[in-house]
Image: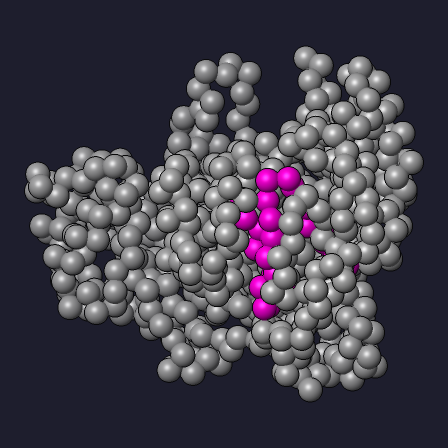
Amino acid sequence: MKYNVGIDIGGTFTDLICVSSDGRTIVHKTLSTPHDSSVGFINGIREVAEMTGETFEKFVSSIDTIVHGTTVATNALLTLKGAKTALVTTKGFRDALEMRRGIREEQFNNHYKNVVPLAPRYLRFTVDERIDSEGKILKKFSEKELLPIIKKIKDEKVESVAVCFMNSYKNSSHEKQALKFLRKNLKGIFVTASFEVLPSIRFYERISTTTVSAFVGPIVAKYLDNLTQKLESINYKGTLLIMQSNGGVVVPDQVKKNPAVTVLSGPAAAPTAGAFYSKLLGFKNCITADMGGTSFDAAIVIDNQCVTSTEGNINRYRIALPSLDIITIGAGGGSIGWINEGGLLQMGPQSAGAMPGPVCYERGGSVPTCTDADIILGYLNPDFFAGGKLKLNKAKAEKAIKTDLAAKLGLSVLETAAGMFRIINSNMAQGVREISVERGYDPREFLFIVAGGAGSIHSSEICKELEIPMFLVPNVSSIFCAAGMLLGDLKHDYIRSYFTSFTNLDRKKFISLYNEMKEDGIHALVDEEGVSREKISFSPILDMRYLGQYHEVQMEASWDDVMNFDLKKIFELFHKEHNRQFGYSLKEEGTEMELINVRLRVVGKTERPRFLSENNNSVTAESAIKEYREVYIPELNKMKKVPIYDGDKPIFGSKINGPCVIEKITTSVFISENYDCEVDSFGSFIVYEKKKFPNGFQLKQKLTEVNESR
């Protein structure tokens, strides 16, 4: 028996999914260990081994592949606890990192402060070299200029160095020379350069991304080395793959070369899983919403493809590498309730995390959180949290909410808990609007897929606020990102800047740039990661704009169109995408277009685990009722006794009427007054609005048909 394991380490829980070669699936959650994430990683493997019934040694020897999503880089940026970083750049551009684009993000806020640069000014050094915009050397680079810089770096005990020279995307010879010299003379210090990280036009984006990679580099490398050693100590012989921000996976050695590719490592797996599940139901478009213990992540999938962006920001730090377009806000089970200066109740973004955690965990937490409110509202069973492994103290949660919030607001504990519930739901709904409405999409026309241990408690109210008629709670909802990791392909993104109008476009150069990136991708996948050539595919992407525009539009073309230099098809795709994003195109006017960048996504297909199998043996929903419990019903604004179903029983094909709660070991699904639910043959819950689906949900029925009545 062979196993594939997906492991996603979050702020509160570490999620695991284990899939055997015959399709048996084990889903498990264990508390994260923030002091050393690898401890929770190994603890989770031990606990899953017990669930398989095999000895730990035998189970480990049977694991073929582990796919891992890590928040190490993300947390380093969010907490600013990365490496002590220096920057070496071209003379005259020492402050470009701090000046950014010269535009204040909140122009009318006089109290708005600039972000703290990851490389402080006293650790930003310059050398007298210069390459012009065409790649010609105007001022030669001398390695002697680096000698005093090296001494200063050593004296200041710098841990990481970023190198980014002006126009090195056109000619990287100076950067390569500097990188080689610095690595030779700075043993034990992480050194990276922009030609390795992001060889593209736009200096600020390039220098920021390179500095981010340097800032998180030693932290990520140390974590991966520590994890690798721990896996070796338990005699693990299989493959370890790391999730990237672009939704693909790579081997750890590739991550060490450019650690910035992991800044959204964990959340990036949710859209991948979302594309898989939406396709099962016959949908091409979906929105995934993942509510964990610390954060809420929303992403979008179009035509079964995860939407990517090159304008990512983490904690206001620009990362221009291709990453899945994900909105992250501080809204999770551990989100803290507090009262602002105006006397209004707020939720988050501060979180109690795993330690000390919510008050009801009895791990030292003293401030009321979302989970404390959920237990008071009846959505959580104090004796069945995590299958009963973690007993929750409802009395302590009530006391904390009463003392910290209710008494100050002049409300009852129940009214305060209901207010906390409504506010955090509204916060999450706004996050979904940001990923959909602000991108030009109507969320009502998408399948809404709910993930995370806490997501399915709050999804009914999020959907009600957004007028979304239906949502899906997958059978692996609580560990959705971990499941998505097992569905990810090996993926590499390449970029070359080629700024020219299409009138002056050099066909030979255009095609040669793509062939060059293709060879780089084949080398990475075949020679370094062992993928066979037959499993490799290529997706060309072009950054284009109309002449005179400031921002470009990214659009995907086919490999044949690029190799055949079929500009007519490429132009048509651009007009169509521009019209979708901005509501107009200049096709009829014949406006000239220009090219900014050419990109290539190289994908190596991986084998999909068989963690889905249809079930025919089922029991009736009525036989799965565990008890009746008082639960808060938002539509009625009061508590009501409703049935509590055992969601781990095989109730496939059953219809369940709301309001009710469906309890699983790893999550709970709250179905409010306005919704009903059907359980599909895979054990997933399809929850739909009663008024929009009076005859129940039909798999063939599309959301666009439902919305015609709006």
Residue 25 image point, x, y percent: 67, 73
Q: In this rendering, would 670 be left or right of 575?
A: right
Residue 418 image point, x, y percent: 73, 30
- The quadrant in which residue 630 appears is top right
- Front-lying residue, 177 or 490: 490
Q: Residue at x 55, y 23 (%)?
A: 113
Q: Is residue 516 above or below residue 372?
A: below
- The quadrant in which residue 589 appears is top left
Residue 687 forms part of the magenta stretch: yes
Q: Tell me where the magenta segment starts and ends, as one range.
A: 663-689
Residue 271 image point, x, y percent: 50, 56
State the residue lying farthest toward the bottom.
1
Residue 563 forms part of the magenta stretch: no
- Front-lying residue, 343 or 38: 343
Judge whether residue 232 can be spotted in this image: yes
Image quadrant where one finds the N terminus: bottom right
Q: Residue at x 58, y 51 (%)?
A: 687
Count all numbered tags in the image, as a single digit: 0
Q: Is residue 332 above or below residue 336?
A: below
